[in-house]
Structure formats: C-alpha cells, structure tokens
Amino acid sequence: MKRTLTAMATAAVLGAVGAGAPVQAQEDPTKACFIYVGPIGDFGWTYQHHQGVLELEEEMGDAVETAYLESVPEGADAERALQRFARSGCDIIFTTSFGYMDATNEVAGRFPDIKFEHATGYKREHPNVATYNSRFYEGRYIQGVIAAATSETGEVGYIASFPIPEVVRGINAFMLGAKSVDPDFKIRVVWANTWFDPGKESDAAKALIDQGVDIITQHTDSTAPMQVAEERGIKAFGQASDMIEFGKETQLTAIVDDWGPYYIERVKAVRDGTWEQVDVWDGLADGHVVMAPYTNMPEDVKEMAADIEEKIRSGELHPFTGPINKQDGSAWLAEGEVASDEELLGMNFYVEGIDNQLPN
Amino acid sequence: MLESVLLTIATAATPLLIAAIGELVAERSGVLNLGVEGMMIMGAVTGFSVSLLSGSAWLGVVAAIVVGAAFALLFGFLTLTLVTNQVATGLALTLFGLGVSGMIGESFVGQPGMRLGVVDIPVLSDLPVVGRLVFGQDPLFYLSLLLTAGVAYFLFGTRAGLMLRAVGDNPASAHAQGISVIGIRYLAVMFGGACAGLAGAYLSLVYTPQWVENMTAGRGWIALALVVFASWRPWRVIAGAYLFGGVTIGQLHAQAIGVAIPSQMLSSLPYVATIVVLVVISQNRRLTMMNTPASLGRPFVPDR
Amino acid sequence: MRIELVKRPQSSPLFSALSPFLALLLTLFAGAVMFLFLGKNPLEALYFFFIDPLLETWSLHELMVKAAPLILIGVGLSVCYLSNNWNIGAEGQFIVGAIAGSILPVMFPGFQTWIVLPLMLLMGVLGGAAYAAIPAFLKARFNTNEILVSLMLVYVAELFLDWLVRGPWRNPEGYNFPETRNFHDFAVLPEIWPDAGRAHWGIIFAIAAALVLWFVLSRTLKGIEVKVVGQSPRAGRFGGFSRARMVIFAFLVSGALAGLAGISEVSGAIGQLRPAISPGYGFTAIIVAFLGRLNPLGIIAAGFVLALSYLGGEAAQISIGVTDKTARAFQGMLLFFVLACDCLIHYRIRLTRTVAARSTEAPAGHA
C-alpha cells in the first residue's frame, strides 16, 4: 500500500513538473524486483533496502516498475521466489541477503537475459550476475575513534549478531579506530545470535552496561539497544538507519546503509543497455555508507570524526593499514601494508587488543 | 551491579510471567490454547498504536488487554462452540495474529513509542540492592505479581476457582452438577487472552518501547512451556519465569566477561535447563498427575 | 439466540465430503471482503492465490517441493496425535535428520560412490528418530511432559546447527561464511523430471509414506492399537497394549519421517547445510496433520493446499502488491474456516432462543 501511495505521489509530482517538459518517448518501464530476507518493518537491514527502492521510484518515476517479496526464507524457497520473479517479466532482480547466493546463480543460469544482483556474496557464475556490498567497516572505524575519545570508562560494549566475516571485520575496524586514540581501549563483545530480537538486544545492552561500559554499539538491527542506552543515560551508536529519534540525547552517530544510489545506477544501466557484471564494494566515497550527523559529543571530537571521515573518503586513510597484529600477537600487516579485499572478505580473526575469544 | 542485573532479569521475566499465568488459567479449565504468541503480538501492536494515537500509555495497555481477549474469544468460539481441534486452532491463531499485527503496524514502524512510567516510591527506592527492585519498577511488574497471587488465591481459595478446576479435571461430572462447562471455559480462555495481550503491551511499552514486526520473537511459546514447567501451579510460574530470565541474562553476562564457550551453547542453556528441571519435577509422579488438568486439550460438548 | 451443537448419531458422510468445499467458499468470501477492504480487486487477488500457481509446469514442481516435507512430517505426526502423544518438536527432528544425513558429504567429501545417497537417507531417518526418542523416553520413563520437551529441543537443534555451520562444518573455501561445502553429485537427491522443474524424490517418499501409514492405520492391528491407546489408555491396557511402548513407537515413526524430510530437503532442494534450512516446516506440518483430519490420505491433500497458499501468497505479492502479512492473515483465516466446517461432520448446528428466566441452578438449563 505504501508502495502504491508513493508511486501515486511520484506520478503526481512528475505530472505537475512534466507539463511543459518535452515528452519522453513512450517506452515500457524497466521492471526491477527485490527479494528481502526480513520484513520491511524491521527498521534495519530490509527496511534500508526498501528505502533504497523508494528512492529508485522517486528518481525514475514512470520509467521503472518495482516489485518485492519480503521475508523470503534462505532455504529452498529462495529459488522459487527468484523463478517467479524471472518469469513475471523482471528485467533486473536484486537478492538482498547472503543466503540467496547459490539460488541467484542457479536461476541466473537459466535466464541469461535477466540481470541478477546479489548483495554481500562472492559467486558470479554467469555473466548476468553482479555482486554488491558496502564497506560498512569504514564507518565502524570512525565510531571507534569517537568511542575512544568520549568514553570515560575506556570500555565499549559491542552487541554482535553472528560471527561472520562482515561482523568480525566491523569489530576489528572499531578496535583499530579506538586504538588510534587510546591504545588501551577495551571492547566487550556479546553475541546475541540473532539479527533481530528487540528484547534480547536490549537484554544484551543492559548486561554490557552492568559490566561497566559507557558506550554501546551494535551490529544487530533493532533500535532497542539505543533505547536502553538512553534510559541508562549513556551514549550509543545507531545501526543501519539513523536512529536519532530513539535516542536524541544518546546517539553519537549512526552508520546508515544507503542503497538508493546503487539501485538507481544499476537500473538506469539496464535501461540504457550498459549493464555489465561488476563486483562492487563501495563505501563512504560513493555514498553507499553515510554517517548520520555527529551529535552528543564535544566539538573537538566532532571535528576529529569529520576529519577522519574525509580522509577515508579521499582514500588517504584505509582503516586496515599496518602495522596490525592479530589477537595472539602474531604479525598480520607490516608497516604501511593495506589489507587486501580478499583478506577482508573472509576475515575470521580478531586484531590485537580485543580480549574476548572469537567463537569459532 | 547486582541490583541492575536483578532488574534486567525482572524485565525479561515479567512478560513471560504475565502470559504464562493467563494461559495457566485457561489450561486449568481444560483448554490448551497454543495461540499465545499470536495474542501477544496483537497486544504488542495494539498497545503501541493506541498509546501513540491517544497519547496515553495506559489507554494502550487497556486496549491491548481488550484485543487479546477478543482474539481469545475467536479461539473460544472455534474450539468451544464449534469444537475444532485446539492444537490446530491455536497454531492458526498464531499465524493469523502475526499477519494481522504486521498489517496494522505497518505505518508505525520506526516511530519511538510511549514508555509506561516507572513507579518510584521515594526514599525506599534508594535502599541498597533491593531498593529499585522492590520499590522502583514499572507498574506492570507489580501487576504481574499481583496477578499471580490473585490467580493462586482464586484457583485454590474460592468456590469459583474450584469450579474452574473441576471443569478442567472432569467436565462431565461438573456438567452434571449444573456447572456451565462451556461458559467457564470461555471466561478462562478470555482471561488467558487478556493476559497475553497485556504481556504484549509490556513488550511494546516497557521492555522495548517501539513496534517492529515479530517483536515477540517466540516469547509466547516460552510462556506456554512455563505453564507445563510449573506443573500448573501459579507460584511455580514465577520461579520458572525468573529462572528462565536469569539463565538468559546470565549467559549474556558470561559472554561480556569473556567466557570462551560458543555462544550458541550458552544460548541453548535456558532450554536445556528447562528440560532438566522438568524431568526432575516429573519424577514425582503423584504430584504431577494431581496438578495436570485431566481433560486438557479435550473438547467437551454438553449432551442434551 | 445461541448456537447449539447436536451430536449426530453417526458422522455425516455428506458433510465429510462437503465441508472442505464449504470452507473454501467461506474463505473465498471472507478473503474477498478483506481484499476489498485493502483496496485490491478481490477476484484478481483470489485468482493469484489459488489459480495462478497451478497454471505452469515449473510452478507445479515448486508445489511438490514445498508440499513434500509438509506431507512427510504431517503423516508421521498423525501417528503421534492419534495415539495421544503431543510431539510438537518435529522441526527439531527435521533439523537433526538433516544434520545426521549430511555427515557423509560434509565430513567425507572425498567418499563419492552411489552408496552415499542411500546411506545419507538412512542416517537422516535414524537421526530424526533418535532425536524424537528423547522426549519419548522421558515421557515413557519419567512421565515428563512431551509437549514441552519436544518444543525445547527445537531450539537446541537450531542452535546446534547454527554452531556446526559457523564452526566445525564451515566450508573451507567459502570465505568463512556460515554454510557447509556444497554436496557432491552423489549426495544430491535427484530431480524426477529435471527438464521440467525442481521436484525431487522427496515428494515420492512423502506419498509412499502416506500410503504405507494409511494402510497400517486403517488395515492392521497396529493401527487399531494406535487408536485404542489414543482414545483411552485404560481400554488399551485391557487390550494388552503397553502405553510406554506406544509412546516410543509413535515418536520414533514421526521422528524418522521428519528426519527423512530434513535430509531430503537439504539434499534435494538446498544442496548444503546453512544456518536456517527450514521455514518452520515442523510447525506448519502440525496444521497440515489436523487439516488432513489425521488421515494420511487427507494429509496429502492438506499438504498440497497449504503449499499452494504459500505459492499463492507470493504470486499475489508480486502481481498485485498484497503484502506478506496479508498472505499470512489470509492463511490463518483459511485454517479457521476449514477447522470450523469440519464441525458439521459430527454435529448439527441448531440456533435456539435463550430463555431469559432460566435458573442457573437448574441442570436442565443445559442438559
């Protein structure tokens, strides 16, 4: 219903603007289809993808037609959902969770004329499969810097979802950022074993606060930890979307996933016939990762954060630049050496300074 | 620190306790309603949306109770009047509730909700350790304890409670004595629904004041398990709910301290603990038999 | 006015046959009202729900893929429920069956001969049965409530699978993502007509299992035993049937079938283990079992109906933007109507006028 409303609103706006403009050649709209792993109403991962789709509709108006399937389980159902999309006239299909990787490639092989885009995966078995992901760790590095500069206890609580490379990378980037300010900074990690369970996430936040941390950061999707932090009067970082509404006095900043620019770029490419297989892994520089405004911190910290953000954006600073040791003290990156994307993609170890054991 | 840990446990345990105590009454009357999760999520979405629209958190709580009871009434109509299978109907109710709540809640996603204020008894709430625990909690926490006490008294100290248990144990003979089996079961089921709705409101107004789809995340099922765990005795539900809450919070603390055990194993602790305790309890055969409502899950149709 | 049920002397064969259609009619009507309320064209919505998925071969294949685990688990559960054993943990048995069956292709990927697949299926069956044996044993030995134990074991199984695929069983070539290596060719359950679609041997297992259990339940002494013990344990004892043995039997049968469903799904439809392999088949199958009136043949039909409602939900989402939530609410409604209409088989419904002055003490008021 939301979709229809937006579409109508967009149409109305376009109608008003387009009255005097030259009429575009009447073409069939490009059909872009999306498969979501969760409900749109999660206000996290899936919500942000859907926001990207709304941006896409806004930008392209009548030139695009969208459809989506939400809460598609990552098992045998994914392939069916993809098939149905492929047969229903989609020109490009985005699959927005890692678990759809094999199904995406499988179906792509059967429908060579349709473009497939898989988020967060690494398999591109057919020329019509592209993969895309964002360098969220860049934002985590900035968070680490802010945390170390503002924390009084010198300890941050990290609510993690599952020990997959994406999450481990985030924890490491955070630690490296923090260590650049305070070499003795500590991170306490709690694995919630869920992407999304507000109750459990809030329990985890409380447990961490009771252990003495004064900043909470999370790699789970709900806003519950932010609310707990607000209630307990400490600071926190938002995840996936700008959660300032849930912690006006609390949110330091948030890493916002902005998929809109990518969706617009790729759908336009399909329309122009310029679509090509890519393996996109973009970050702050391309606007795929956006930092929410720096709030609730001293001015000098704000400046420092903005400065680091700019350095990462310009490519001057890569969060994973040596010298970096692994958790056990063994050398990983030599002075000045930058981690390869390959290594980052499969990261399954902690860097030096993190006390917890990585569950493996 | 101990105080705040206990507070966290109380927050985790309270919704389980409220939902379980309601289901306990329903089951004591002989009706097994597996739709707790569905009624709970309806309570959560109702509580959230009504409080946001009306500006009163309490109005949200009341609405959640009403909607929970209404859903239970639907369940009652199907299972009691139309004698459908209780297990299947309960599962269908959960499915229905998850769907409908998602539809209602669509426009409320991403909005911060109202929070039910904390009761703060001055001076006393500043006492060390137990101060906030006993004298400074949210009103529903106190209500959950009152509910438990009330249900315990009602079931074992009043004539009406005796009738309800009679209906659950031997509906035929209760019927022969002129008790309206179906009428009592309707009331018991609706009480269960009201409690589930209240538990849902606790989630969206106290625990995590927001609305997101599926935010009950299986708590309705845990509440169901607690009833059996408590062998249908009200006071034991408290023990069960707090034990479950304690183990859940305990494993998070263990992780935060840095205990190197796979987190999945720690996460499964509450479930394993429940099974173990249950086995120990059920060793005492006489006791369990005595408390289990003999006609649980079986339909009753008055002969004419 | 009040509604009263009058028990029929015998169950009505007419309504036995008619009730599913009546339920369908009511669902169509209520669904139409709901879609109208949401601003959708009801006819279009219902078309996508019930007809569209049946029009193409590939979609029929998908229907079989989706129905296979539901039927397999459902028929197993019917034995449990008929004998009054409340196994609601089939989801866990499904998962453990999938894990046990995957031991060979995951841990011994070099062992590639034709015997691998039969061994996998066997191990899946044994794994599911063994996991179901836990609540069965506890019930038979200690009288522990099986509803609770079987349900709790679901969570334990999910977490165990999660640990396996993120830890020891993780694909060494998979960039540390949480999934096992893909099964080799000898470990994949073949598709029946590979050119036409994805349906694999799982659906054949399902229908075979249903037929066998239908025969056992309706034509053999064991079937009588199941029903007698289920209806009245006391009568069962007089008949010389052991309640404890029946508990074990029923759980082993349903666990074995759930395990078979698990390994069939993993080996036939997914091709590897991953953190989530089941979208709640074990729970949905409970509904399927009751929709099929605990009759294995009815369960075949019920499995297909429920599978259709999933496929139809997707078709409606894509084509007319009915959301996933609406689809779920609609499914719930469908189940309500089906269950309610079955009431007509055993009862006549009579509307009577309440007499206001009726005294509450008078037993006649109700009898």
Image (spheres, rainbow, N blue to C red):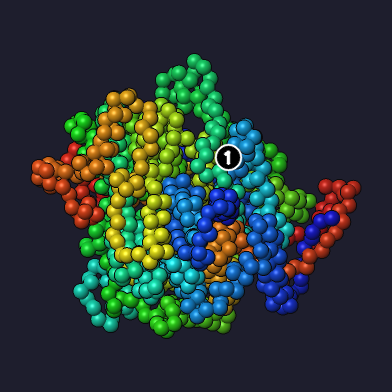
Disc 1 crowd rating (10 Å Cα; few below 14, some 14-19, many 20+) is many
- What amino acid type is highlighted by mark number 1? Phe
Asked if residue C27 lies left or right of residue A313, the reply is right
Q: Position of residue B288 (x, y in %)?
A: 53, 50
Residue A315 falls left or right of residue B89: left
Task: Please name the residue shown 73% across and 53% down the image.
Answer: B182
Determine the residue located farthest toward the top in the rendered image. Answer: B123
Q: Is residue C352 left or right of residue A149?
A: right
Residue C89 in view (yes/no): no
Q: Secondary structure at mark 1?
A: helix
Indicate the quadrant where residue A336 lies: top left
- Number of callouts in the render? 1
Residue at 62 percent across and 66 percent down: it is C45
* Residue A108: % across, % down: 37, 71
Please state which of residues B118 and B48 is positioned toward the viewer in this rendering: B48
Q: Is residue C292 above or below residue A327?
A: below
Q: Residue at x 26, y 28 (%)?
A: A149
Of A256 and A158, which appears nearest the observer? A256
Residue B202 rendering spot, x and y as whole percentages: 54, 38
Can residue B139 be seen at all in this image of the molecule?
yes
Q: Residue at (30%, 56%) from the top-left corner?
A: A280
Place residue A150 in its image quadrant.
top left
Quadrant of the drawing holding the N terminus of chain B? top left
The residue labelled by disc 1 is B48
In-image side of A56 versus B188 (left or right): left
Quarter in which the C terminus of chain B is drawn: bottom right
Which quadrant of the view contains residue C196?
bottom left
Question: What is the chain identity of the residue bearing mark 1?
Answer: B
Spot occupied by residue A99 in the image (x, y as percentages of width and height): 36, 61
Q: Image height check: is B273 above or below A210?
A: below
